[in-house]
Amino acid sequence: MNFFEHQDRARRKTGMLVWLFIVAVAGLIAGTYVLIMSLYLGGLEQASQQREALINQFGPDTFWRPDILLGVALAVFLVVGGGSLFKTAQLSGGGEPLALSLGGRRLLNDSGDQVERKVLNVVEEMALASGLPVPPVFMMDREQGINAFAAGYQPEDAVIGVTRGCVEQLSRDELQGVIAHEFSHILNGDMRLNIRLIGIVHGILLVGLIGYYTLRIAAASSGRRSSNNKGGGGLAFLGLGLGLMAIGFIGTLIGNLIKAAVSRQREFLADASAVQFTRDPNGIAGALKKIGGLNTGSKVTVAKAAEASHMFFAEGVSELFATHPPLAKRIARIDMFWQAEMQVEQATQAGASSSTPHPAFAPAGAVGFAGSTASSMPPPDTLPPRYEPQPAP
């Protein structure tokens, strides 16, 4: 399977996963409707003396009420849509503020530093290969792990960031592979897609928060009521709050799982695109192997790194919520001769103490490059097929 086929497969899987978000929102509407109708019909059963008046006011005691379903759907769309638009606008301010918040220092185009010139030259080469404008480049000077990120909402406001370890410990070919990977994220709109998915998850979370505050208000109000005065209404609000909390928080959990799965597919797409841009699978494969083989791995220590984990070349988190596939799978798709053994490569800097082998390759993180949490290696015969460079059609 060549890298064009891998790109097509990753795009198809992304499309299917995005459709799951639509299914999740539909499930949110259905769950809210069932909750409201259950509370309504339960209230009719308890208020037998007022049953006829309630039916006359609110309609028959049947579970299927299209008018209520329409109202619930509209309310859920307003909450999820409003929360999504707010969060998307909040995260769409361009890549430079984020790069600065992560401790990045912008590299000047006229820099005379040899290391900085290497990075700037590689970025210019990959911009030419991908057909994109040359973005600003930021260096995270205090980070010794091998990592990089692309940030921004549009190609026009995108930036690329690299850690000091990425520049000093990778060869030029390996650095090309990493930078090409980041350019793929810019070219394919992965940053914009991820921000939109974050927005939808935030909107779903708002449903749970509405339930939480409804529960608090109901609990506070019930303390001021006597058991003989509107007690049923207080219980109904307690039930509504608990139900919305459960629906919203379960929906958020499912949304985060889908978002992480989408990010993992975009990482496979970016790896395949990096091979396309560089015409050399050994570059990005070597960078991934070196991340797994060095003790520092892809670790980023800055405090805000957790918030921006979806943007890095790699990240160590639990497998279900990991925004990158495991390094083992990524390498196996690129290098058919790699046999799942830990390949420790000498760091570029002489005397670097970080060349101690990492105990195992990590599950990788989000719009960035690699991870630092140990994970077991799969057998070689279970690894997926490699990318094979092919001439452009």
Image (cartoon, rainbow, N blue to C red):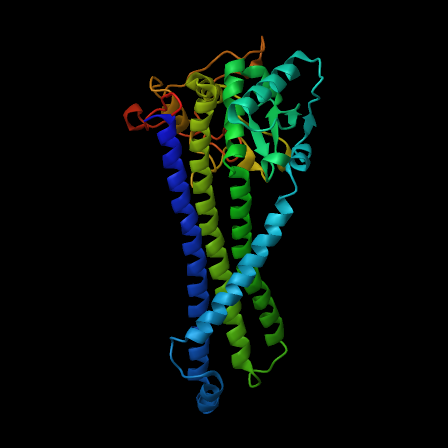
Q: Give the farthest residue toward the front.
A: 393
The quarter of the picture where the C terminus appears is top left
Residue 134 is drawn in which quadrant?
Answer: top right
Q: Viewer-proximal residue, 166 or 8? A: 8
Side (left or right) of 224 relative to 383: right
Residue 109: image location, x then y, percent: 69, 20
Residue 146 showing in the rendered view: no
Residue 263: image location, x then y, percent: 47, 39
Residue 228 is drawn in which quadrant?
Answer: bottom right
Side (left or right) of 294 relative to 383: right
Residue 198: image location, x then y, percent: 54, 47
Q: Viewer-proximal residue, 75 or 188? A: 188
Which residue does the image show at 62% across and 24% down from the upper left?
Answer: 143
Q: Viewer-proximal residue, 382 or 122? A: 122
Q: Give the farthest residue toward the left.
A: 381
Which residue does the image show at 45% across and 86% down from the upper left?
Answer: 55
> Does residue 19 sit above or below 288 in this rendering?
below
Q: How many marks?
A: 0
